[in-house]
């Protein structure tokens, strides 16, 4: 389905379905001016996504000679169709340098092998890891081939006709997620950095010490921008964007305190044990009934919260024989009091 969502610049949204995925859809935005087109993200490498994307582009009578693609970040629901869509076309594919370099390590490097070993250390079994190789959409619907891009840095600009967009680096959700901002219109494409009716997943990344800290700092960075309209990559954009950022900050404080309580109740536990103690949206299912791919995301987010505590000296990671265990380094009540002080600073910035 194609919907016009903004007039100046002209922006359309193609509703790209994400079958069998709790995200439900990708909002693929298409910016057009003076015969030029910029597409933002693609959807999974799945037939349903490709059909929706191509139908929307056909309805817009796109001139592929003047069409480029911007990938906000490396996740397969955003990059999956990039080489398919742009094959044998003259346009450029743009992506942040940081995410593209990490993406290369995923597609042709050892990142998945290292990640699997990390999850084994955090309580997953060999059998669960084998199942995830087929069930995890991050692995099943990635691009069919590795591809080249024009690498972007924070502060670079892209133009579509007479309109100039600023590239804004917001590490956290991925190591190098990048947003587009149009300053005259105060228009921000928020990708997965700010979502309005679900909270962006913040997970552990190989080689990144503090994904959650990076994400919260990126929220502070974006809060300083004048934003009149925010267009997210999934679902709706109802509500005030600044209020939503505050809500996300509060969500992570609540989750952090739950993590501290779980560590206090079960000292020296791995991330899977701790994650099972937290409150997730599981629609009445128990932790064991929760789909394995969703448990994988939940444990990844738990690791990110544990990393945050470890980086600030509130907890330590112990381990033996390739297994991880986390312990608080102070009384739980004192730890949560320190977290309240830190969060007051996030609120004040």
Image (tube, helix red, strand yellow):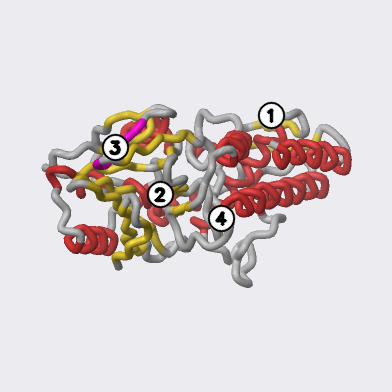
Which is in the foreground here, disc 2 or disc 3? 3
In the image, is residue 165 part of the stretch drawn in magenta? no
Mark linked to residue 44? none
The location of residue 82, given as percent across then percent down, is 26, 45
Q: CA distance from mark 1 to mark 3?
A: 39 Å
- The answer to which of 314 and 161 lies nearer the viewer is 161
- The answer to which of 126 and 40 lies nearer the viewer is 40
Decide which of tag 2 and tag 3 comes sooner along the chain: 2
Q: Secondary structure at mark 4?
A: helix
Decide which of tag 2 and tag 4 comes sooner along the chain: 2
The residue that appears at 16% across and 43% down in the rendered structure is 66
The residue that appears at 25% across and 59% down in the rendered structure is 53
The answer to the question of whether label 4 and label 1 lie on touching residues, with beta carbons closer than 8 A, is no
The location of residue 69, given as percent across then percent down, is 27, 43
Q: Is residue 91 visible?
A: yes
Q: CA distance from mark 4 to mark 1?
A: 24 Å
Residue under label 3: 159
Mark linked to residue 311? 1
The location of residue 16, given as percent across then percent down, is 33, 61
Q: Give the residues in magenta.
A: 157-161
Mark linked to residue 138? 2
Residue under label 4: 295
Decide which of tag 4 and tag 1 comes sooner along the chain: 4
Q: Secondary structure at mark 1?
A: helix
Decide: few, some or many residues near mark 1? Use Cα within 10 Å; few <14, some 14-19, many ≥20.
some
């Amino acid at each position: 389905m194609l919907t016009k969502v903004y007039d100046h610049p002209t922006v359309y949204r193609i509703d790209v379905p994400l079958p069998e995925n709790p995200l439900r859809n990708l909002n693929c935005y298409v910016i057009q001016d003076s015969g030029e087109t910029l597409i933002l993200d693609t959807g999974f490498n799945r037939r349903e996504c490709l059909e929706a994307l191509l139908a929307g582009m056909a309805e817009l009578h796109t001139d592929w000679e003047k069409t480029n693609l911007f990938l906000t970040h490396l996740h397969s629901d955003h990059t999956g169709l990039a080489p398919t869509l742009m094959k044998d076309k003259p346009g450029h594919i743009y992506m942040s340098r940081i995410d593209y370099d990490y993406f290369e390590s995923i597609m042709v490097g050892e990142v998945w092998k290292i990640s699997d070993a990390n999850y084994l250390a955090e309580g997953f079994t060999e059998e669960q890891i084998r199942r995830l190789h087929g069930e995890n959409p991050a692995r099943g619907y990635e691009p069919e081939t590795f591809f080249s891009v024009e690498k972007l840095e924070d502060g670079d600009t892209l133009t579509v006709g007479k309109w100039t967009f600023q590239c804004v680096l917001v590490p956290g959700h991925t190591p190098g997620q990048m947003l587009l901002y149009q300053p005259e219109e105060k228009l921000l494409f928020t990708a997965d950095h700010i979502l309005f009716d679900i909270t962006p997943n913040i997970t552990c990344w190989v080689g990144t010490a503090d994904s959650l800290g990076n994400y919260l700092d990126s929220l502070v960075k974006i809060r300083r921008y004048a934003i009149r309209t925010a267009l997210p990559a999934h679902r709706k954009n109802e509500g005030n964007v600044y209020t939503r950022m505050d809500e996300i900050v509060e969500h992570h404080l609540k989750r952090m305190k739950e993590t501290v309580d779980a560590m206090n109740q079960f000292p020296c536990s791995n991330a899977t044990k701790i994650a099972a103690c937290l409150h997730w949206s599981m629609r009445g299912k128990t932790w064991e009934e929760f789909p394995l791919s969703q448990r994988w995301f939940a444990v990844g987010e738990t690791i990110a919260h544990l990393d945050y505590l470890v980086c600030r000296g509130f907890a330590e990671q112990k381990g033996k024989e390739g297994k991880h265990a986390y312990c608080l380094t102070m009384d739980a009540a004192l730890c949560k009091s320190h977290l309240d002080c830190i969060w007051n600073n996030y609120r004040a910035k």
